[in-house]
Amino acid sequence: MTGSASELAHRLGEHAEAVCREYLSNGHRSGNYWMVGDVRNTRGRSMHVRLRANAKGPAGRWVDEATSEFGDLLDVIRESCGLVDFRDIADEARRFLSMPLPPPQPQPQPLGAQCQPAAKRGSPEAARRLFAMSQPIAGTLAERYLAGRGILLSTHERALRFHPGCYHRNLVTGETQTLPALIAAVTNLDGRITGLQRTWLDPSGHGKAQLADPRRSLGDILGNGIWLGHEPGMPVPVMAAGEGFETMASLKVVIPALPVAAATSANHLAGLTFPPGCRRLYIAADADAAGRHGIERLSQRAGEAGILALVLQPQLGDFNDDLRHLGPAHLAAWLSDQLVPEDVRLFLPAG
């Protein structure tokens, strides 16, 4: 690294242990090294960070013996916070070092050059990188959070991941923090990640994090969805769709063979792309005005495409309320009266 990046890396190295305690909190000190599972703050011992300069090299350099990855503390900040743009990484480093942020600088376009910049904030590429930085949910706080909501899904659901230290910026104050998060991939019908939804979790394990907006999406969401139980590129004769991930995951618990898609908002629900071969669409109801608009618009589009659209109504506030308070057996019985008889035989488990 050169210039400001090199300077920031050196300054962080002067406070290497403090950096590790902040961004690699799942590790611990052992002699002159900080031991942790990997640069994404997973528990373990395969990665070690040098805390003080010695004959082997400067403070702050790290190596992951399991993967042969190596780098400096700017890389730690990037990976543990889920950042992509260097400007964001540098700002976070300066925040940690209590350094003033530099004034915005114009970004000139080199004449005659075909620039290939790093992934822009909020872009599909940024979503794909953050998803790749995350880990399967089995045994994590994300799995515990879902279980607390009554949502017990197959470990083969590829759309769900966990990030132990996902970056959150307060949109009003600009303050930043890292918190564990459930990461849900938003994909197109070919299975390519176009965006994702982050649900920040309380580190104590008590539900969502205490934030004004504990759930945010990024990337290209319109037309795509958080798909559960869908094989990319395969025909989907019958499916269910709705706004919220937890609503659709609750349906998936009691109708495990039915492909479902969460569009993340009413407007996105209205624009959901229909999979090939779809002939019947169940739409999970939402009581608010925006939700009704999304259902009406999606139903209209389905009819124009020759797809039968049927609305599923929850008994309580939403299907997750039904699942948690009434139980899966009661919810399955409630849904059986709303499904086409053929679909009851196909999708609802006997008994």
Image (cartoon, helix red, strand yellow):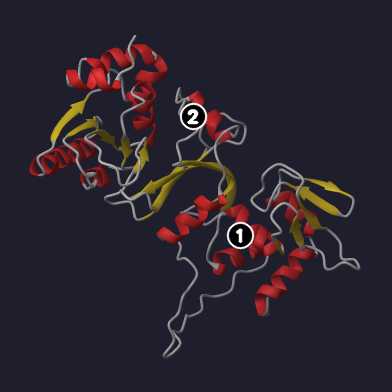
Gap between marks 1 and 2 measured at Cα? 27 Å
**Mark 2 crowd level (few <14, some 14–19, many ≥20, 10 Å Cα):** some
Q: Residue 153, position in %: x, y?
A: 45, 28
**Mark 1 crowd level (few <14, some 14–19, many ≥20, 10 Å Cα):** many
Which element carries disc 2, helix, strand or loop?
helix
Regarding residue 18, the answer to whether it shows in the image is yes
- Look at the image and tell me in which quarter the N terminus lies: bottom right
Which element carries disc 1, helix, strand or loop?
helix
In-front residue for pair 35/351:
351
316 lies left or right of 100 = left
Q: Residue 3, position in %: x, y?
A: 67, 80
- Look at the image and tell me in which quarter the C terminus lies: top left
- In the rendered structure, find residue 281 and report the number of the disc placed on it: none
Q: Residue 135, position in %: x, y?
A: 57, 44
Residue for badge 2: 146
Residue for badge 1: 78
Query: Which residue is depicted at the point 84% across and 68% down?
Result: 57
In-front residue for pair 242/234:
234
Quarter residue 249 falls in: top left
Identify the residue at the far bottom of this view.
111
Q: Residue 192, position in %: x, y?
A: 38, 53
Regarding residue 122, the answer to whether it shows in the image is no
Query: Which residue is depicted at the point 34% across and 45% down?
Result: 232
Tag count: 2
Q: Amino acid at mark 1?
A: Arg
